[in-house]
Amino acid sequence: MFDATSQPTGSDGTSPFEKERSSSFLKLVDTTKHFGGLPAVDRLSFSVRRGDILGIIGPNGAGKSTIVNLISGALPLTSGSIYYQGRDISSLLTNRRVYLGIARVFQITKPFMDLDVRQNVLVGALFGRHRMVRSAALRMADELLEEVGLAHKAHFKGDQLTIADLKRLELARALATGPQLLLLDEVMAGLTSTEVMEAVELIRKINDMGITIIVIEHIMQAIKSVSDRILVLHHGRQIAEGQPETVLSDPKVIETYLGKRYAQQYKRPEQVNGSSLDENTQSQI
Amino acid sequence: MTTNIGQLARVTKPLPKQTKERRTWLWSLLIGLAILAAIATVPAYGNAALLHTWTWIVMVIVLAQSWNFIGGYTGYAAFGNVAFFGIGSYSVGLLVLAGLPFWVGLIVGGIIAGVFALLIGLPVLRLKGHYFAIATLGTAEALREFVEVKDIGGGGGGLMSLPLPGLNAYTIVFYAFISLSVICLFITAVLVRSKFGYALIAIRENEQAAEALGIHTYWYKVGAFVLSAVPTALAGGLYAYWATGFDPGTVFDRSISVEIVLLTFLGGTGTILGPIIGGILFETASFQFQTSGLSLHNTLLGFSIIVVTIILPQGLIRLLQEFTRKSAPDLTAVNRFMEGLQRVRRYITANGI
């Protein structure tokens, strides 16, 4: 719907190849969200291509979770608009957006404690995009639990699960809604390094199913390895966007995370050898 | 690490893919039917006072069962359900006085209460928590005032000596209440396994997450409110038939609203059996206190409510569920029992005291 003439700002969509691919699966135009006088997201514009994994990073309070809340419809926009598959969804209710294929995973897991794991996933299948009948929904729930590795705990309740399992449950529940766009808000927070590796694996698997994903994460190694592109936010504004390697070695990004001194320190080696800088940055971050 | 162990367990001991679902709902339904069947034998004793008591208890059970839809399953503490009760009573009273048969008044009362719940629910269900509770309480009070001030059906004096059988039809009224309770029981049992029921439970457990899974929470809440209103109004209509006379203070009595909330909490909110068990226990205790000659009736009742809420945070049924909850499959019976006790203890300390 949105052709190359209405390319979102901030995207380096100049090459013809780029233009062709960016059919703007999801596009945010000048989205702004104020909490009182505080702008949590400030005239932010970016777009996500179909099938991509976009990583969003930024220091605490950068507005990452707010973006997820805006896209999923949990919070109303102050101004700007959000286009999903060419359609303006800015004023749609959350449940309508789920119906269109936008699912989210909460940063703080919110299981339905009184329902067991299987029933939790069942709710997603019953009400999501496909609005399944009970028998089909149950089958899907079982499949998804197998997929995320929770099948052996299908009859457990929320308070019997570990953090990692709760995250799996959140993921399975979101997948049960049949999403085309999945918003992952810090799914890896609080996981051990083994679990993080498993989560990265799982995210890739989900992406391979053809689901576009936006990942918000603090764990650099994980987000670097999983994302096709990375967007860096600071005070609700975009400060960098592009390939993971390029973005993470951007002096502006280093400055945001580690302060000006580090950024200056690394400016010189960057001109000599980009890759050595990259490793340094990684260890610092 | 946990998952590795889990995967290992799956390799060594493959669990059947379609593990049997627990049929709590079926057991609850059967037990509920058995209890109501037992109560249904009361007229056989030929004791008028006993019949009166149990008619009242079953009526309260019906009220609690219908409150359970909005308060128990949806988790919205409605404190004004007596409004629907009053609507039911007044519909029957006014229409019977106008010369229409009783059942017309009953049906009209149900419809009016449903529509009223819809109209009130639309604004009120935008509120959450205490605000919702206060708003519903206010609605019921406002309705009572309206009836009194606007002189509807005799105003504050109420409707007296309606041309209804009343005393002569005690047994009929009793069985009518029993039938209504059985209907509510079936609705609840179907509800917990239905899509509608899952939506309500999801809203109660986490409204934000429910929305994020595609549930139009607002309309489901309104639906639950209407579902709660209609049987309440029917019970109100039956009450009019039974009492043959009432005033606004009786059928819009806010203590009824509070009582049904309390007794459902005692039995277990959001459970099939909770309202029935809670109703029987609460009302029998209440009658015991009343007839024991002590003027401390309300004090004792209040005190026991405090004790109950401390040691039974979500009711007897919840405690039982916690005890019978599925534990690891390879435990011996004794260990399973001990683990059940442990869970109950933990549950109380976590949710109560």
Image (cartoon, coloured by chain):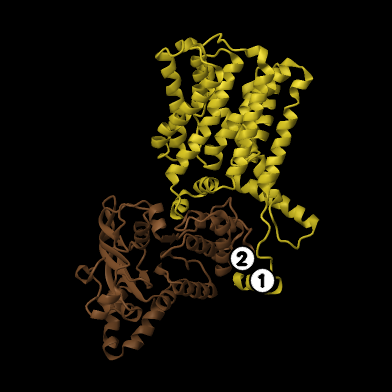
Chain colours: A brown, B yellow
Q: Position of residue A52 (x, y in %)?
A: 37, 73
Q: Secondary structure at mark 2?
A: helix
Q: Residue at x 62, y 22 (%)?
A: B298
Q: CA distance from mark 2 to mark 1?
A: 9 Å
Residues under numbered marks 2 and 1 in contact, where contact means CB atoms less than 8 Å apart? yes
Is residue B172 visible in the rendered image? The answer is yes
- Answer above or below: position of B60 versus A186: above
The residue pinned by badge 1 equals B10
- Number of residues whose C-alpha sits closer than 10 Å to that of mark 2, classed few (under 14), some (14–19) or many (20 or more): many
Q: Position of residue A129 (x, y in %)?
A: 44, 58
Q: Secondary structure at mark 1?
A: helix
Is residue B353 visible in the rendered image? The answer is no
**In-image side of A88 versus B6 (left or right):** left
Q: Nearer the viewer, residue A231 or A116?
A: A116
Judging from the image, mark 1 belongs to the subunit labelled B
Judging from the image, mark 2 belongs to the subunit labelled A
**In-image side of B212 versus B196 (left or right):** left
Q: For residue B237, what is the image quadrant? A: top right
> Label 1 is placed on what type of residue?
Arg
The residue pinned by badge 2 equals A151
| Quarter the C terminus of chain B occupies | top right
- Answer above or below: position of B12 versus B181: below
Q: Residue at x 36, y 69 (%)?
A: A57
**In-image side of B56 versus A67 (left or right):** right
- Number of residues whose C-alpha sits closer than 10 Å to that of mark 1, classed few (under 14), some (14–19) or many (20 or more): some
> Label 2 is placed on what type of residue?
Ala
Q: Position of residue B204 (x, y in %)?
A: 51, 45
